[in-house]
Amino acid sequence: MIETITIRENALPSDMGALLKDYPRETWTAHPNFKQATQNWLGAHRAFRKLSKVMREETQSYLNHDLPGDELAGGLAYYGDALVRNLYGHHHWEDRSYFPELSAADPRFDTGLAILEKDHVCFNDLLEQLTRKANRVIKLVQLDETAAYDEAGELLPITQKVQTLLTRHLSDEEELAVPIILHHKLRG
């Protein structure tokens, strides 16, 4: 049984974006304080978006009978492992290193951080569901194609939720953190 997980649909409160007005997204890469560390962090976010999209699309392709079961199983094993393992590591690093640095530099980060941390708790629950269901699909592809198809039907909404939460969370996180980084000349 898949438990219901409520995904935050609202953007961060507008006062959280105070610095975003001074440092809009389209100006980040040209800013002199936009350093390699920030580029790498945003690159990890792009990778997470891509991995979640690939998992959703491959699951949908399998359900549409456009992708063989063994290819779905291989993709779920590879992309699922990469997404889950790297997201856990990324969040751990953010919580231990990145976010405390931003919080120390600018107390305005703390209110947004509380919201982002709730997203991280939601991620943990969703990633557990994703792992459990994807592993069942992988096993069943070899044992019972009909059961694998049914499980993939249950996996699809989980992949959609992961992609939806990632889209909301990463965008908010970036728009909260990068202006602080640029403003305070951090991560350089």
Image (cartoon, grey):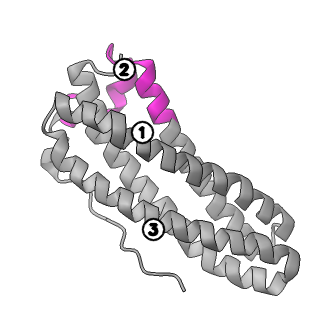
Marks 3 and 1: in contact by CB < 8 Å? Answer: no
Mark with earlier residue (1, 3): 1
Q: Position of residue 22 (x, y in %)?
A: 19, 29
Which of the numbered marks, if any, corresponds to residue 53?
A: none
> What kind of element bears circle 2?
loop
Position of the C terminus, as image quadrant, is: top left
Q: Amino acid at mark 1?
A: Trp
Q: Residue at x 32, y 48 (%)?
A: 172
Kind of residue sitting beneath label 3: Asp
Horizontal arrangement in the rendering, residue 179 relative to residue 111 (left or right):
right
The image position of residue 93, as x and y in percent, is 42, 39
Residue at the spot 65% in from the left edge and 54% down from the top edge: 81
Give the structural element (helix, strand or loop) at label 1: helix
Quadrant housing the N terminus: bottom right
Q: Which residue is mark 3?
A: 125
Kind of element beneath mark 3:
helix
Q: Which residue does the image show at 86% across and 80% down from the upper left? A: 143
Cα distance between the residues tagged 1 and 3: 19 Å
* Most distant residue in the top direction: 32
Marks 1 and 2, how far apart at CA:
20 Å
Which label sits in the foreground, 2 or 3?
3
Q: Which residues are magenta?
A: 20-43
Q: Is residue 156 left or right of residue 20?
A: right
Q: Which mark is residue 93?
A: 1
